[in-house]
Image: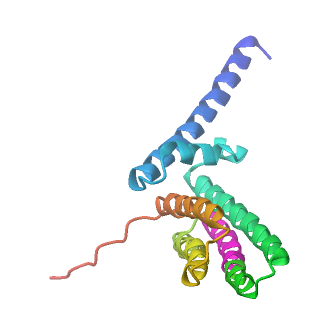
């Protein structure tokens, strides 16, 4: 190959990487603008933890966000199982059981959401939004189980982190969805 060809290929690769980086940054700017409690830097840092985000388009980023939230839910489910195994108090085991159930369901919902997003169809995206919204209930339900018993949750940190990740997944996926069309009024 001639040196000019190498230069051209290098510029093409750099351009492609910059464009994807811009997609990630633009997506995080749009998301953060609507979610002041989860800032732009958190969004970028979260995506950069997954190498595929460097070259992902907006749909790819939404699927990655669902997978990241799913991994967090799965990690929380494993922690809950460990806590249940060592817990001697029956009431606390019951509360942990509530958390185990909702996080198990959230793992499934987030997996389905990632698949739905990847399909790239409007209906699939709407289905994904429904799954993501439902998964977002897990930390609140878990915390409520402890709060109703006037007990301190051993999962408060995990619940807070998962809430941020699930909110991000839902918000980024919502950016893919076209706004609902206004009803047509006939004369």
Q: Is residue 186 left or right of residue 12?
A: left
In this orientation, does residue 55 appear? no
Q: Which residues are magenta?
A: 102-119
Quadrant housing residue 91: bottom right
Q: Is residue 99 one of those drawn in magenta?
A: no
Quadrant housing residue 17: top right
Name the magenta segment's main secondary structure. Answer: helix
Count of marks overlaid on the render: 0
Q: Position of residue 102 (x, y in %)?
A: 66, 79
Q: Is residue 111 one of those drawn in magenta?
A: yes
Quadrant in which the C terminus appears: bottom left
Instruction: Work out whether 180 lies above or below 157.
Output: below
Q: Residue at x 46, y 64 (%)?
A: 177
Q: Residue at x 79, y 69 (%)?
A: 78
Instruction: Work out whether 6 lies above or below 61.
Output: above
Residue occupying the far left of the picture: 187
Quadrant housing residue 115: bottom right
Q: Position of residue 88 (x, y in %)?
A: 81, 81
Q: Residue at x 48, y 47 (%)?
A: 39
Q: Position of residue 183 (x, y in %)?
A: 28, 78
Q: Residue at x 39, y 50 (%)?
A: 33
Quadrant in which the N terminus appears: top right
Residue occupying the far top of the picture: 3
In this orientation, does residue 180 appear? yes
Q: Position of residue 160 (x, y in %)?
A: 58, 62
Please name whichever residue, 69 or 98, is drawn nearer the observer in this view of the structure. Answer: 98
Q: How is the image coloured?
A: rainbow
Instruction: Work out whether 47 lies above or below 104.
Output: above
């Amino acid at each position: 190959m001639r040196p000019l060809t190498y230069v051209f290929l290098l510029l093409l690769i750099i351009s492609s990487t910059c464009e994807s980086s811009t997609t990630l940054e633009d997506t995080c700017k749009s998301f953060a603008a609507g979610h002041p409690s989860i800032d732009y830097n958190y969004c970028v840092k979260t995506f950069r933890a997954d190498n595929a985000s460097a070259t992902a388009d907006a749909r790819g980023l939404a699927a990655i966000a669902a997978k990241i939230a799913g991994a967090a839910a799965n990690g929380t489910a494993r922690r809950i199982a460990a806590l249940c195994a060592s817990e001697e108090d029956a009431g606390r085991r019951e509360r942990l059981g509530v958390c185990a159930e909702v996080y198990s369901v959230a793992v499934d919902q987030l997996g389905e959401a990632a698949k739905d997003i990847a399909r790239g169809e409007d209906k699939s995206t709407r289905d994904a939004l429904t799954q993501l919204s439902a998964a977002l209930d897990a930390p609140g339900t878990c915390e409520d189980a402890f709060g109703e018993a006037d007990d301190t949750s051993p999962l408060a940190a995990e619940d807070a982190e998962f809430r941020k990740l699930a909110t991000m997944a839902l918000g980024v996926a919502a950016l893919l969805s076209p706004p609902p069309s206004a009803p047509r009024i006939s004369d």
